[in-house]
Image (spheres, rainbow, N blue to C red):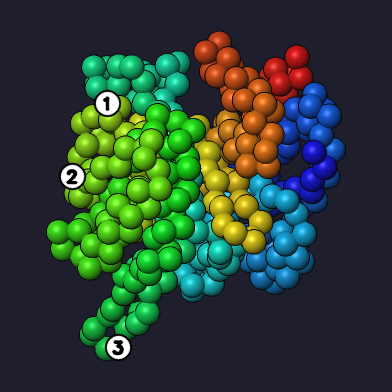
Amino acid sequence: MDAQIAVLGGDGIGPEVTGEAVKVLQAVAQRFGHRLVFRYGLIGWAAVDGEGAALPESTIELCRASAAILLGAVGLPARDGSLPPSERPEVKALLALRRGLYANLRPVLLHPALAARCPLKAEVIAGGIDMLIVRELNGGLYYGQPKGRTGDRAVDSMVYTVAEVERIAVVAFEAARLRRKQVCSVDKANVLATSQLWREVMINVARRYPDVELRHQYVDACAMQIVQNPRQFDVLVTENTFGDILSDEAAVLAGSLGMLPSASLGEGVTPLFEPVHGSAPDIAGQGKADPTATVLSVAMLLDHLGQGDAAAQVEAAVSADLATRAGTRSTSQVGDALAAAVSS
Ligand SMILES: NC(=O)c1ccc[n+]([C@@H]2O[C@H](COP(=O)([O-])OP(=O)(O)OC[C@H]3O[C@@H](n4cnc5c(N)ncnc54)[C@H](O)[C@@H]3O)[C@@H](O)[C@H]2O)c1
């Protein structure tokens, strides 16, 4: 494979964790004979300082010209007061970068070595947790019109079209085919018109996937089920706001924020791969950040670019590393160990 990867480190621990992930990607690329070119772009407060914008035009161009984007994180709470919320990097840069990327994929895997860090009882997690949350990322309440405030009244509109639900359903069913062939669609069809449309489209798309089992759950029940019986979930697909909340709830199950990767995919738009965690300014620059989530994001990147064997090599290296990890290791020690493991 020949490919250009846009690397956007961003703020806080972002450049530290992407640095280690690139190290691992370079090592696995060498092993599999891939020729990868890494180009670095500014995003976040570093870009505000350097170029006067949280997502400068030069970074947008770099992303357009690349096969994939590897992002660290953006945001520095200490500087929030200097810009209105809508101008801060988390809104200005991330929303722009994610435009057109309608499918957000978040695998939640509890590694046996981290079971003690999972807040659920041992009997609830016995047998392991392995689910994939597929969140619709470009529709719903966050984008629907009308939206805004007039005097003492404010409105947000939850809007979905058949086409928007169809394309995310296809992502969920295709993903399920590669897993345990079960899709749980989460909605609020007893109350919301958008959810009734969502459910109708899910049922229609399911007809094209007779080998995959589809069931439905109301979002309120699902929020309980995630902590009561997480093993029941294989692929969980849901709309933007529900997905935002449920994926953060499910993230806790993996035992550490430093473990969770994500991918955001669309058609005709450069795919984005990033850890679920933020910029962790409390530990930035101290070599304490765990790069595992970003390294696992690299595995998702490789898989998306059709390099399943290389992706599996990275995942196996992470599993082995977690199983044998002892004591406290620095960010670069973890990166070095994983790079060595994928090379051997
Ligand atoms: N996608 C993104 O860029 C993104 C996502 C979430 C938050 N943020 C931003 O990040 C900033 C900090 O937010 P926060 O503190 O709420 O969330 P956070 O995820 O940055 O940190 C939460 C806690 O987890 C720890 N942590 C996070 N990642 C870790 C890692 N890889 N290794 C070890 N420990 C880790 C942190 O030290 C902190 O104690 C804010 O400005 C927020 O807006 C950005």
In the rendered image, which quarter is residue 36 located in? top right
Residue 34 higher or lower than 245, as above or below? above
**Residue 90, how many percent across, how many down?**
52, 61
The residue under the point 63% across, 42% down is 304
Secondary structure, mark 1, is loop
Query: In terms of depth relative to the viewer, which is nearer, 176 or 284?
Result: 176
Q: How many marks?
A: 3
Q: Earlier in the sequence, mark 2 or mark 1?
A: 1
Q: Mark 3 points at which residue?
A: 150
Q: Residues within 10 Å of mark 1 (few under 14, many from 20)?
A: some
- Mark-to-mark CA distance, 1 and 3: 44 Å
* Residue nearest the viewer, comparing 6 with 292: 6
- The Cα atoms of the two marked residues, 3 and 2, are separated by 34 Å
Question: In the image, what residue occupies the spot 80% across and 24% down?
Answer: 31
How crowded pointer 3 is (Cα within 10 Å; few <14, some 14-19, many 20+) is rated as few
Identified by mark 1, the residue type is: Leu
Image position of 303 with respect to 190: above or below: above
Q: Which residue lies furthest to the bottom in this view?
A: 151
Single out the mark in the foreground, 2 or 1.
2
Name the residue that disc number 1 marks: 120
The residue that label 2 is drawn on is 221
Q: Is residue 322 above or below residue 332?
A: above
**197 relative to 305, above or below:** below
Report the quarter where the C terminus lies.
top right
Amino acid type of the residue that numbered disc 3 sits on in the rendered structure: Thr
Q: Can residue 125 be seen in this view?
A: yes
Asked if labels 2 and 3 touch by Cβ distance under 8 angstroms, the answer is: no
